[in-house]
């Protein structure tokens, strides 16, 4: 059985190599090659490099929102099954992140922010990252299916495919709206957590999905504004690169305006109490104020430090933690 | 390229062994964790 699975996997891996060879031709028209240092690695990749492939900082937000969705859901879930659900969300996110880094290794090598990742730095074979990502993704879906049911496992599978294929491979190199549509990938965790706890999809987890979906564009575009030269260098059509800064700033403001009423919808539909409602209104108002500052200003010159953009990016992270923290606090205290 | 360590040097071989040992230990810990997790899931599912 073991050798059968091994042979099967060897066959699958061979086919994957045929489809995605190391020196593949990218849709954006460049032929890329493995970094020189990774052609023949003097050392095997360290376990820390595999951990880094999972994008632990991004994963912390994924775990937190997934956990909040699970806790805020009505009813009771066995602690072991709840823990397993969160673990599977984390494993799925880690697997998708590894596949993202496998696909974008050559792009990461060209950007200051990402060039020290294990693949562009030449500390790991590209196929190791691919196999690790596929293994984590498959394990997360299978374990969630066994422990929590078919529906949350199916949504987890969709979220992994959405991030690794729809966003990373298809949208990101092709359209400046990549973040808008791709934002759905990061919006799945609270939905999966909720469905793992209740077994079905209702309006409330869909609203939580919509909040993160609406939050993602201003969050990413704030970052893109101050690292746009990196994106331009590697040919990724982020909005500031393609449509310009003015259009990006306008879009940030539009999404922040839409996010304000959307964030209080859970209170409005009776899914939460006043604690969440007031917290969401205040947090979103601050988000809108910072977005307005970014949306209405123009870069003063090349020496501009982009402080408002960096503050908006930092606040956007605090915002999501605080908003979902308020959701859980409301659930416990109300 | 000249900055790459010699893959056959004793230092590199020793470092390689250390990395492989750490990876094996990490793999063993992960497998042990999943054995315990599957046992716990089984018990939890039997209760419901």
Image: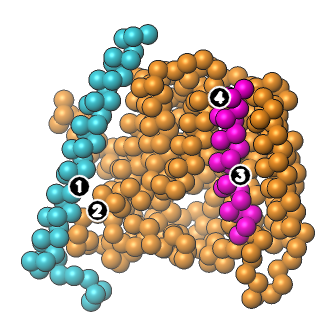
Chain colours: A orange, B cyan
Q: Are marks 2 and 1 in contact (CB under 8 Å)?
A: yes
Q: Quadrant of residue A168?
A: bottom right
Q: CA distance from mark 3 to mark 4?
A: 20 Å
Q: Chain of mark 3?
A: A
The residue under label 3 is: A319
Label ID, residue A227: none
Real-space Cα distance between discs 4 and 2? 42 Å
Q: Chain of mark 2?
A: A
Give the label, 1 or 4, closer to the camera: 4
Image quarter for residue A9?
top left
Quadrant containing the N terminus of chain A in the rendered view:
top left
Inter-mark Cα distance, 1 to 4: 41 Å
Identify the residue at horizontal 32%, vertical 48% (top origin).
A13
Looking at the rendering, the stretch of residues picked out in magenta corresponds to A310-334
Dot 3 surroundings within 10 Å: few (below 14), some, or many (20 or more)?
A: some
Question: On the image, which quarter does residue A7 sit in?
Answer: top left
Instruction: Provide the secondary structure element on which disc 4 rests.
Output: helix
Residue drawn at point x = 41 percent, y = 49 percent: A133
The secondary element bearing badge 1 is classed as: helix
Q: Is residue A326 magenta?
A: yes
Task: For marks 1 and 3, give the CA distance.
Answer: 37 Å
x, y percent for residue A240:
76, 70
Decide which of tag 3 and tag 4 comes sooner along the chain.
Answer: 3
Neighbours of disc 2 within 10 Å: few (<14), some (14-19), many (20+): some
Q: Are marks 1 and 3 in contact (CB under 8 Å)?
A: no
Which residue in the structure is indicated by mark 4? A332
Q: Chain of mark 4?
A: A
Between disc 2 and disc 3, the foreground one is 3
Q: Is residue A99 visible?
A: no
Name the residue beneath numbered marker 1: B23
């Amino acid at each position: 059985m073991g050798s059968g699975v091994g042979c099967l996997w060897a066959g699958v891996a061979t086919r994957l190599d045929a489809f995605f060879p190391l020196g593949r031709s990218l849709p954006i028209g460049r032929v890329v090659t493995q970094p020189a240092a990774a052609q023949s690695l003097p050392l095997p990749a360290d376990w820390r490099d595999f951990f880094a492939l999972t994008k632990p900082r991004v994963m912390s937000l994924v775990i937190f929102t997934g956990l909040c969705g699970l806790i805020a859901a009505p009813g009771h879930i066995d602690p072991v099954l709840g823990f397993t659900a969160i673990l599977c969300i984390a494993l799925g996110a880690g697997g998708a992140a590894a596949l993202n880094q496998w696909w974008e290794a050559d792009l990461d090598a060209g950007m200051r922010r990402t060039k020290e990742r294990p693949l562009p730095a030449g500390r790991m074979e590209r196929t190791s990252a691919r196999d690790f990502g596929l293994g984590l993704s498959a394990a997360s879906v299978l374990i969630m299916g066994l422990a929590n049911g078919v529906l949350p496992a199916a949504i987890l599978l969709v979220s992994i495919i959405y991030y690794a294929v729809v966003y990373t491979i298809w949208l990101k190199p092709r359209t400046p709206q990549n973040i808008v549509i791709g934002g759905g990938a990061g919006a799945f965790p609270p939905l999966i957590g909720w469905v793992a706890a209740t077994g079905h999809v209702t309006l409330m987890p869909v609203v939580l999905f919509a909040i993160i979906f609406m939050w993602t564009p201003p969050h990413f575009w704030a970052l893109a504004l101050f690292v746009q030269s990196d994106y331009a260098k590697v040919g990724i059509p982020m909005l500031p690169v393609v449509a310009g800064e003015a259009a990006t700033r306008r879009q940030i403001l539009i999404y922040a305006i839409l996010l304000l009423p959307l964030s209080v919808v859970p209170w409005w539909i009776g899914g939460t109490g006043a604690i969440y409602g007031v917290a969401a209104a205040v947090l979103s108002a601050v988000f809108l104020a910072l977005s307005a500052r970014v949306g209405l200003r123009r870069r003063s010159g090349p020496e501009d430090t982009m402080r408002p953009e960096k503050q908006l990016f930092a606040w956007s992270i605090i915002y999501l933690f605080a908003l979902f923290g308020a959701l859980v606090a409301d659930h416990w205290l109300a | 390229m000249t900055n790459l360590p010699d893959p056959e040097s004793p230092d590199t071989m020793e470092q390689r062994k250390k990395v492989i040992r750490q990876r094996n230990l990490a793999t063993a810990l992960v497998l042990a964790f999943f054995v315990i997790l599957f046992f716990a899931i089984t018990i939890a599912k039997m209760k419901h």
